[in-house]
Image (tube, rainbow, N blue to C red):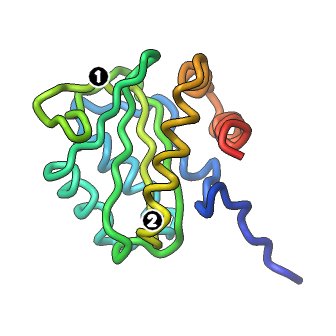
Amino acid sequence: MESSKPELILGMDLRPEFVVIDLEADSNLPAIEILAKRLLQEGVVKPSFVSAVMQREKEYCTGITFPEMGIAIPHTFAEHVIDPCIGIATLKKAVTFQSMGMPDIPCNTEMLFMLGITDPETQLDFLQTLMRTFQTAGRLKALKATKCPQELVDLFKSYVI
């Protein structure tokens, strides 16, 4: 019996198990921790990933404000990742992240897109694809409105593939 390989999105694995709908957190680091622990639970990142992604957020902010809403794209170094993956969380209520490249500017964040990157060479291409994808009006709101992990995965795939 053959084992099935996951369908990759831009070289990254995204499954409903990597999605948290209506994540509840009071601030950015607990939100990151919850989603990182989900990826750890699913076996796609190493135990060191959880603290590494939280530490990296303190040093390099990942919030991005789009006209529809703010998002954050927390990630860390490849040495903490087993398989390339994306974790996605919709937040029950927005939390404040600091803006990427402008840490003095707060970003009211409603969704997280956590990247488990194994090849740093692909990181910029992936981030550019996300930026182009989310500049299209209605896409972030549609993703945020989903209430089922599989629906969110399918919708995300339809946007980026």
Q: Is residue 37 left or right of residue 52?
A: right
Q: CA distance from mark 2 to mark 1?
A: 25 Å
* Residue 59 position in % (x across, y down): 14, 52
* Residue 108 position in % (x across, y down): 29, 22
> Most extreme residue toward the left, as rendered?
104
**Residue located 46% across and 72% down the image:** 118
Image height check: is 68 above or below 13?
Answer: above
Image height check: is 58 above or below 68?
Answer: below
Name the kind of residue labelled 2 in the image: Ile
The quadrant of the picture occupied by the N terminus is: bottom right
Q: Is 38 in front, or is 126?
A: 126
Q: Helix, strand or loop at disc 2?
A: loop
* Residue 158 position in % (x across, y down): 73, 38
* Residue 147 position by quadrant: top right
Q: Helix, strand or loop at disc 1?
A: strand
**Residue located 41% across and 39% down the image:** 112
Q: Is 130 in front, or is 33?
A: 130
> Most extreme residue toward the right, as rendered?
1
Name the kind of residue labelled 1 in the image: Asn
**Label at residue 3:** none
For marks 2 and 1 on the same chain, the one whose residue lies earlier in the sequence: 1
Image height check: is 101 above or below 51?
Answer: above
Q: Is 93 in front, or is 109?
A: 109
Query: What residue did someone put label 1 on?
Result: 108
**Residue located 50% across and 68% down the image:** 44
Image height check: is 140 above or below 103?
Answer: above
* Residue 61 position by quadrant: top left
* Local crowd size for mark 1, using a 10 Å CA cut-off: few (<14), some (14–19), many (≥20): many
Q: Is residue 32 left or right of residue 96?
A: right
**Label at residue 117:** 2
